[in-house]
């Protein structure tokens, strides 16, 4: 109690079975100690199983138990988790399975949900994109998902898969006790839910946080949702945005000398020599290389796309990216890390079309669309990281993609700050979000890949 103190000696014995390699030394072990007061209440812990740590650190007034799941509710609870290069929010804990549902804090991309005649999650382009295990898909770029994520989760009755979306039920409960504008699940962008309004229209979350609906063939932002397995542990962090919880097996330290091409989509990199020097990993589309893109559109810089809807290193925007941008925004030290030539795919899309047509001539992916070679390019619609718009610093305009509007000779698709896509005349002005591949021998010299501590990199010569 407050008038006395007690000293305790804690001892731990380690069996030889913990040293299977038999080298006899220099191993470190840790033990978690839970301290209980006289009332028997457990002290909040920063480490332990995900469900236990999160719920023990969330005030009871920010929890709601509907009998099946315990939901986290309110305006801004400390439920941030960093996993696989992305910032997530813990939404709920299943009372029986002890699994934890997560949703990404920001939109990861923009897709048409489905064709105009169906709003079912089953067979939707959104479900396909979320669970795509090709190099371009979300699930394929999620770190060790077999270890971390519950497979075959039932998102709606009879429809299972590994990755899904939030329902309007999840969303509405999340702002219990406050308003939809102030609920923590409102990120200021538009994004799909998996809840149909009727046979052909679907509910989405509008930029102001309200629940709205539109035809299922519309392009909107997409926030992936996963369920962490019950045995996953938190090993660091306090759940705040600046110090999110870190998971065992995804909390890498001392990455000095590690090849960048072994890292994960979404991780941050310091690159370039001016105010536009924060970038994110997109994917490893080309084996051995690392595609990255600026975390935000270039500040105070807009450009027309060109005279046609096909990107090239010599059209208006391509001339800037492969000339002035490399010289004035990047500089020689970083320029040398960029692969000299990358293939950029120039497929066509419009609302209601499968996202794969931005890269391939058909959804079977038998052959790729028309392409061009250039050192620097742009992202495609529906590519990873092509829906990135941190609400705290929204630009006043839209940024260009490589993807043309299908069936037209004038339109190129832009991504809107509210996180949807639309066609724009090639000679209109738009913001620029550069993308390029880094060479296979780029290594990490410091950092952990988070926004507050991005990777510093150099060429391994």
Image (cartoon, grey):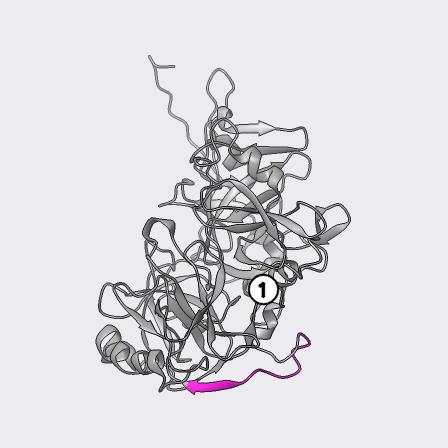
Residue 401 pos. (x, y %): 44, 71
Res. 328 in view? yes
* Residue 34 is one of the magenta-drawn residues: no
User: Quick one: which residue is furthest to the top in this view?
Assistant: 3
Relative to 76, say whether 251 is above or below.
below
Quadrant holding the C terminus: bottom left
Residue 105, position as x, y percentages in the image: 46, 49
Q: Is residue 373 above or below residue 130?
A: below
Query: Bounds of the magenta span?
Result: 363-373
Q: Residue at horizontal 49%, vertical 62%? A: 421
Is 99 in front, or is 461?
99
Residue 116 percent across, percent down from the top left: 67, 59
Question: Where's residue 41, x and y in %?
Answer: 50, 21
Left or right, 273 with respect to 410, comes to left
In depth, the one of 354 and 457 nearer the eye is 354
* Nearer to the camera, 342 or 43: 342
Q: Residue at x 36, y 62 (%)?
A: 295
Looking at the rendered structure, the number of numbered marks drawn on it comes to 1
* Residue at the spot 57% in from the left edge and 68% down from the top edge: 350
Task: Choose top left, top right, bottom left or bottom right for residue 146.
Answer: bottom right
Q: Quadrant of the N terminus?
A: top left
**Residue at 41 percent of width and 85 percent of height:** 312
Looking at the image, residue 17 sits to the left or right of residue 325; the answer is right
Q: Main secondary structure of the magenta part?
A: loop
According to the image, label 1 marks what residue? Answer: 351
**Residue 366 highlighted magenta (yes or no):** yes
Q: Identify the secondary structure beneath mark 1.
A: loop
């Amino acid at each position: 109690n407050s008038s006395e103190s007690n000293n305790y000696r804690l001892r731990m014995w380690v069996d030889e079975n913990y040293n299977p390699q038999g080298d006899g030394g220099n191993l470190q072990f840790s033990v978690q100690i839970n301290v209980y007061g006289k009332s028997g209440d457990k002290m909040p812990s920063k480490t332990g199983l995900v469900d236990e740590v999160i719920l023990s650190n969330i005030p009871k007034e920010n929890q709601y138990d509907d009998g099946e799941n315990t939901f986290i509710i309110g305006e801004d609870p400390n439920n941030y988790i960093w996993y696989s290069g992305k910032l997530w929010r813990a939404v709920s804990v299943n009372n029986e399975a002890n699994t934890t549902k997560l949703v990404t804090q920001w939109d990861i991309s923009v897709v048409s949900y489905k064709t105009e005649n169906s709003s079912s999650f089953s067979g939707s382009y959104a479900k396909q994109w979320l669970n795509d295990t090709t190099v371009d898909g979300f699930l394929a770029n999620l770190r060790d998902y077999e270890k971390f994520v519950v497979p075959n989760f039932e998102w709606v009755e009879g429809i299972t898969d590994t990755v899904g979306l939030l329902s309007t039920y999840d969303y509405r409960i999340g702002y219990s006790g406050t308003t939809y504008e102030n609920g923590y699940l409102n990120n200021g962008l538009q994004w799909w839910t998996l809840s149909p309004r009727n046979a052909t229209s679907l509910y989405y979350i509008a930029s102001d946080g309200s629940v709205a609906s539109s035809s299922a063939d519309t392009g909107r932002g997409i926030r992936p949702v996963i369920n962490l397995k019950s045995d996953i542990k938190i090993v660091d962090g306090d759940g705040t945005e600046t110090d999110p919880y870190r998971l065992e097996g995804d909390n890498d330290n001392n990455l000095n000398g590690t090849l960048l091409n072994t890292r994960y989509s979404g991780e941050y990199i310091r690159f370039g020599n001016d105010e536009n020097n924060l970038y994110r990993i997109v994917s490893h589309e080309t084996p051995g290389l690392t595609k990255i893109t600026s975390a935000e559109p270039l500040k105070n810089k807009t450009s027309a796309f060109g005279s046609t809807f096909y990107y090239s290193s010599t059209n208006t925007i391509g001339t800037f990216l492969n000339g002035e941008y490399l010289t004035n925004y990047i500089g020689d030290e970083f320029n040398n890390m960029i692969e000299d030539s990358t293939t950029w795919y120039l497929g066509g899309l419009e609302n209601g079309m499968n996202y794969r047509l931005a890269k391939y001539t058909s959804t079977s992916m038998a052959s790729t669309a028309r392409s061009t070679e250039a050192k620097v390019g742009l992202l495609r619609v529906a590519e990873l990281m092509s829906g990135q718009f941190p609400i705290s610093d929204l630009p006043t305009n839209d940024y260009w993609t490589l993807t043309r509007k299908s069936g037209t000779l004038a339109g190129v698709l832009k991504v809107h700050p509210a996180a949807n896509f639309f066609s724009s005349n090639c000679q209109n002005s738009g913001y620029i979000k550069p993308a390029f591949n880094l060479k296979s021998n780029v290594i990490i010299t410091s950092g952990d890949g988070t926004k507050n501590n991005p990777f510093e990199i150099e060429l391994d010569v």
